[in-house]
């Protein structure tokens, strides 16, 4: 049986033939299977968090936030339309720290917005003992 086609992944990742990956083959693997399928690297986690913003999956966003920096709750801007993600750089700082620089574009009430951020990630064990990447915080470029 063919899995339900959930459409192209919002993060825009391409396969080896430069075709957009399907949700189930890309960020859906992590967002829909948080406990069994941790994102394998900081870029995959960053992409899956962008996709979780697009699909308003607050539970995933909070669970992948480093506990030391995790907000109590998360609100989505009503009417925000995400237009795309452009990952500029993925750099490992050491075995458990990485940075991902990206530009995320959105439109809110007719106005185009561009978020250019360098995010910091840490690899740590969660409460269940699973090693996974967490988003820590980010530096925003004007
Ligand atoms: Zn994706």
Image (cartoon, rainbow, N blue to C red):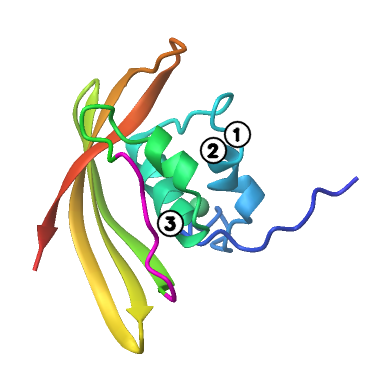
Query: In the rendered view of the protein, which quadrant contains the N terminus?
Result: top right
Q: Residues within 10 Å of mark 2 (few under 14, many from 20)?
A: many
Q: Is residue 126 above or below residue 116?
A: above
Element carrying mark 3: helix
Real-space CA distance between mark 3 and mark 1, rounded to the nearest whole angstrom: 16 Å
Element carrying mark 2: helix
Q: Residues within 10 Å of mark 3 (few under 14, many from 20)?
A: some
Q: Nearer the viewer, residue 58 or 36?
A: 58
Real-space CA distance between mark 1 and mark 2, rounded to the nearest whole angstrom: 5 Å
Location of mark 1 (residue): 33
Q: Is residue 65 above or below residue 81?
A: above
Location of mark 3 (residue): 53
Q: Nearer the viewer, residue 56 or 82?
A: 56
Real-space CA distance between mark 3 and mark 2, rounded to the nearest whole angstrom: 14 Å
Identify the magenta region.
Answer: 72-79
Q: Are marks 1 and 2 in contact (CB under 8 Å)?
A: yes
Q: Which mark is residue 30?
A: 2
Residue farthest toward the right in the current orientation of the protein: 1
């Amino acid at each position: 049986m063919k899995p339900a086609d959930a459409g192209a992944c919002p993060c825009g990742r391409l396969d080896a033939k430069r075709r957009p990956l399907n949700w189930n083959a890309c960020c859906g693997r992590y967002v829909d299977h948080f406990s069994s399928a941790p994102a394998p690297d900081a870029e995959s986690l960053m992409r899956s968090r962008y996709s979780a913003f697009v699909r308003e999956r607050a539970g995933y966003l909070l669970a992948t936030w480093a506990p030391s920096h995790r907000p109590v709750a998360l609100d989505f801007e009503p009417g925000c339309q995400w237009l795309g993600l452009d990952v500029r750089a993925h750099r490992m700082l050491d075995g458990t720290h990485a940075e991902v620089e990206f530009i995320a574009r959105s439109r809110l009430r007719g106005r185009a917005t561009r978020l250019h951020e360098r995010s910091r990630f840490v690899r740590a064990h969660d409460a269940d003992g699973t090693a996974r990447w967490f988003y820590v915080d980010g530096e925003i470029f004007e």
